[in-house]
Image: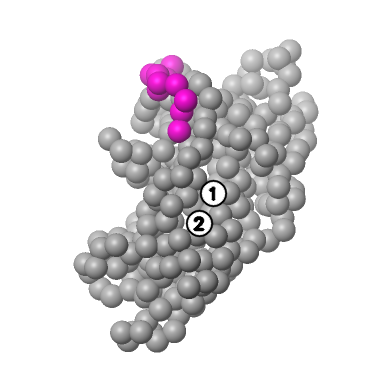
């Protein structure tokens, strides 16, 4: 099974793949044979200067803002302090501006399926062989619902092709950014909710010159299991550590894109 097929399987299992809805780049258009605007070419991407962060722990939700390069967040959960290290300089942490870089190249390779777009982006891989997860760390309600093999070694990042979908109307797209690895919450593997989407500003709508000129109102989201970013206290009770292990952390930031060529 390829990383891309694992990724789609994980999205479906989590209920995160927006297949037949009116969201940006609705997934139903992946198999559409209708015409789509030309988005192929080089694009320059500009980001907001802040990251919105959402931390979910055992049903509780905490929101914060940090700078574009990440930083530390301290919260109090059930009367106990927790410290999260969200530093984008960490090699295993892929922040929004890395997952969806400042310059991207988009391809539409299949003339029969113009709504499919391919972009080369950073993707995570495990530096050691994958292993079977512990029974109590996978299944329904966990970060690994299908009990796929997990990485217990270090995570590295390399460039790999990612799959996206242009909406049926041709005025938006959605691109799936990661989740090639299942996570046990300890390593910083991207979760299936990680994606980028935006509206497309087009010229020549519906004609042979139909072409996208701008990406507007974009939002890029990357998400992780909580424990990989938690600077924990080993003397804390095991119940709290288990909650953090099953927690999730999302980084979000807005972006716009301008065609270079």
Residue that sits furthest to the top in the current view:
235
Neighbour tally class for label 1: few under 14, some 14-19, many 20 plus, Cα within 10 Å:
many
Disc 1 secondary structure class: helix
Determine whether 242 is above or below 202 in the image: above
Q: Main secondary structure of the magenta part?
A: loop
Q: Is residue 115 left or right of residue 46?
A: left
Q: Residue at x 42, y 45 (%)?
A: 160
Q: Residue at x 52, y 30 (%)?
A: 155
Disc 2 secondary structure class: strand
Q: Is residue 38 left or right of residue 152?
A: left
Q: Earlier in the sequence, mark 1 or mark 2?
A: 1
Q: Is residue 21 visible?
A: no
Residue 29 inside the magenta-drawn segment? no
Which mark is drawn over residue 99? 1
Q: Residue at x 54, y 54 (%)?
A: 100
| Residue with the mark numbered 2 | 196
Q: Nearer the viewer, residue 123 or 12?
A: 123
Q: Which segment is the magenta one?
A: 125-134
Q: Is residue 80 visible?
A: yes
* Viewer-side label of 1, 2: 1
The x and y percentages for residue 70 are 71, 44
Q: Quadrant of the N terminus?
A: top left
Q: Residue at x 60, y 52 (%)?
A: 97
Marks 1 & 2, CB-CB < 8 Å contact: yes
Determine whether 129 is above or below 167 in the image: above
The x and y percentages for residue 43 are 51, 66
Residue 131 inside the magenta-drawn segment? yes
Q: Nearer the viewer, residue 85 or 28?
A: 85
As measured in the structure, the alpha-carbon distance from the residue carrying label 1 to the one carrying label 2 is 9 Å
The x and y percentages for residue 106 are 42, 62
Neighbour tally class for label 2: few under 14, some 14-19, many 20 plus, Cα within 10 Å:
many
Q: Is residue 150 left or right of residue 89?
A: left
């Amino acid at each position: 099974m390829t990383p891309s097929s694992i990724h789609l399987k994980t999205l479906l299992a989590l209920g995160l793949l927006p297949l037949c809805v009116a969201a940006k780049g609705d997934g139903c258009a992946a198999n559409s044979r209708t015409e789509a605007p030309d988005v192929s070419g080089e694009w320059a991407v500009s980001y907001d200067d802040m990251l919105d962060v959402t931390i979910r722990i055992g049903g509780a939700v905490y929101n914060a803002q940090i700078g574009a390069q990440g930083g530390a967040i301290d919260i109090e959960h059930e009367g106990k302090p927790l410290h999260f290290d969200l530093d984008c300089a960490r090699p295993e942490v892929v922040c929004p501006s890395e997952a969806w870089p400042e310059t991207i190249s988009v391809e539409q390779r299949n003339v029969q399926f113009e709504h499919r777009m391919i972009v080369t982006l950073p993707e995570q891989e495990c530096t050691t062989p994958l292993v079977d997860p512990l029974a109590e760390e996978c299944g329904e309600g966990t970060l690994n619902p299908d009990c796929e093999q997990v990485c217990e070694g270090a995570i590295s990042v390399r460039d790999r092709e990612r799959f996206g979908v242009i909406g049926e109307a041709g005025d938006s797209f959605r691109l799936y950014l990661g989740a090639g690895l299942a996570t046990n919450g300890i390593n910083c593997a991207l979760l299936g909710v990680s994606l980028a989407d935006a509206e497309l500003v087009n010229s020549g709508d519906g004609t042979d010159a139909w072409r996208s000129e701008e990406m507007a109102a974009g939002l890029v989201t990357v998400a992780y299991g909580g424990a990989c970013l938690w600077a924990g206290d080993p003397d804390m009770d095991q119940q709290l550590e288990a909650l953090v292990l099953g927690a999730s952390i999302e980084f979000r930031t807005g972006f716009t894109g301008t065609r270079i060529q």
